[in-house]
Image: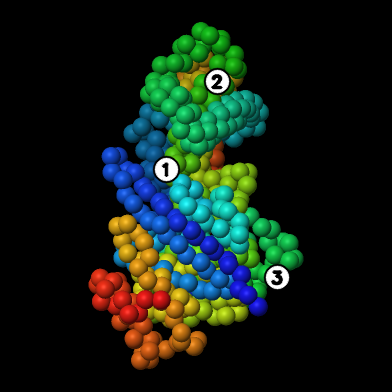
Amino acid sequence: MTAVTALRIDQLNKTFSTNAQKVHALDRFDLKVQEGELVSIIGPSGCGKSTLLKLVAGLDTDYEGNIQVFSEPIIGPSKERGFIFQEHRLFPWATVEGNIAGNLKLKDAAVRKKIDDLIGLVNLRGFEKAYPRQISGGMSQRVAIARALLRNPKILLLDEPFGALDAFTREHLQEALLNIWEKNKTTMLLVTHDIDEAIYLSSRVVVMDAHPGRIKAIVPIELPLPRTRSSKSFLEYRSLIMKYLNHDIEEVEDFSI
Amino acid sequence: MATVMTTELEVQHLPRKEKAVRKLPGVIRAMAIPFIILVAWEALARSGYLAVNLFSSPTLILLKGYELMKSGELIKHLAISLQRAVIGFGLGGFLGLAFGVWVGMKRKTEQYLNPTLQMVRTVPLLAITPLFILWFGFGELSKVLLISLGAFFPLYLQSFLGVRNVDNKLFEVAKILEYSTAEKITKVLFPGSLPNILLGIRLSLSTAWMCLVAAELLGATKGVGFMIQDARAFMATDKVFVGIIIFALIGKLSDSFVRVLEERLLKWQDSFKA
């Protein structure tokens, strides 16, 4: 069985011009993600990792190069490319189930069934009728994940989804995400600034460099799931990625893939 | 985390009876000052310290109110006043809402319309009244138009503000979830600006009410405002008070109605339980 390419990015260039200044956000960026893969992108702030995600989502269509999702070019935003923002972005006036349903009808039996299943999957039984203000940040983010999953996205884009949460909740949600990924095998592209999160979750970690944003290295994580954060091999990956993030490429040249 | 949540939810779903019992002390506290004033007023009027022909007394006003009610005079005036208020508020409020949303949604519309409307807004309504009478006569039209002009601005301003206050980030979500334009309006824009719109309705209602009184005092042959003016000419102080009380009651009633609406529709708001 040959793997299907879920996401293919070729020679992607993106510049922002503010007043007289031009900022090169992404420079000749290439990336291929296979179907069912969970790939993390990590890098210093300003490396264009969030910009990249916005481009794949279709929220910004001003770029040079080529982005294809399942061999189709990106025209605009689509529910086929689910997006999880750093903030949960739930509609404050809708209940948990109302938020997950969004513009779909809760009364529709098929939708109802899927929502009930998803509420079970993200562990929110009993909170169906609660408003966002009544639930915690971690729960809200789980609602946002369920909202994206209801639309059967071909790829799920996550923009530092757990960055605003406390450490305890973050680990809990990382486990939950891994759980969902193992069950659904949804292709995921995760932007993060948390090295442990990247190693814990992904099959590959893309390390980026800033100004201009380009790929410094791609590190495949060859550890069986579930991973232990304190294991020796985990820490080795950690220091390797740290080196990529902190030092010049020459020092770790022998690791290149 | 989970246990805290359940208790929080339980509090919100308290049975109605219990809620009413809890509210009772508040109601009593609210009534305390009016009650003291009424008792003092009655006592001063009866003992002769207050001139009854100028200040009347609570019992005299009550009697007069009953008499006016029985003869049907009050109902007749009230009906015409309410009719003017409803038509005027309906027209002005609707236009205010429509223009507010339109201007809020489109920058170009804002650039064309907003400066002019803001300019007109600063003109005191009472100053325009003579013009309205000149143009539209003493009939119903001038009154209804004056009321709608008064009702227009608060709703215009608040719905404009409401639309602008809707978080752009939520529109981004709506785009990704592929909401249609109609869904973006009904499921994002409308609920998002509802707090402001409801506030606008409340403000509009009170301005409409004020304009009604002004219009009826300045020239009318029917209506509660006319009744007051007419009673003043005959020094019927008790009748003046009956009119004032009617205005106050209806004003309070309509305000409470919008408050109930707010409580129902905005229970999702964090800041509502003040």
| Disc 2 packing (10 Å; few <14; some 14–19; many ≥20) | many
Q: Residue at x 57, y 60 (%)?
A: A69
Residue A35 percent across, percent down from the top left: 58, 71
Relative placement, left or right, of A212 versus B70 is left
Kindly indicate whether the residues beneath marks 3 and 1 are on one polypeptide chain: no
The span from disc 2 to disc 1 (Cα, nearest Å) is: 37 Å
- Which chain contains the residue that carries disc 1? B
Residue highlighted by disc 3: A113
Q: Give SS at disc 2.
A: helix
Residue B240 percent across, percent down from the top left: 48, 27
Amino acid type shown at disc 3:
Lys
| Disc 3 packing (10 Å; few <14; some 14–19; many ≥20) | few
Q: Residue at x 56, y 10 (%)?
A: B137
Classify A86 as above or below B109.
below
Total number of numbered labels? 3
Classify B78 as above or below A205.
above
Amino acid type shown at disc 1:
Leu
In this rendering, the label closer to the viewer, 2 or 1: 2
Residue B121 percent across, percent down from the top left: 41, 25
Residue A253 percent across, percent down from the top left: 31, 76
| Contact flag, marks 3 and 1 (Cβ < 8 Å) | no
Which quadrant, please, contains the N terminus of chain A? bottom right
Amino acid type shown at disc 2:
Leu
Residue B37: name its quadrant: top left
Q: Residue at x 58, y 67 (%)?
A: A5
The span from disc 3 to disc 1 (Cα, nearest Å) is: 62 Å
Residue highlighted by disc 2: B145
Q: How is the image coloured?
A: rainbow
Classify A196 as above or below B207.
below
The span from disc 3 to disc 2 (Cα, nearest Å) is: 53 Å
Front-most of A11 and B63? A11
Residue highlighted by disc 1: B38
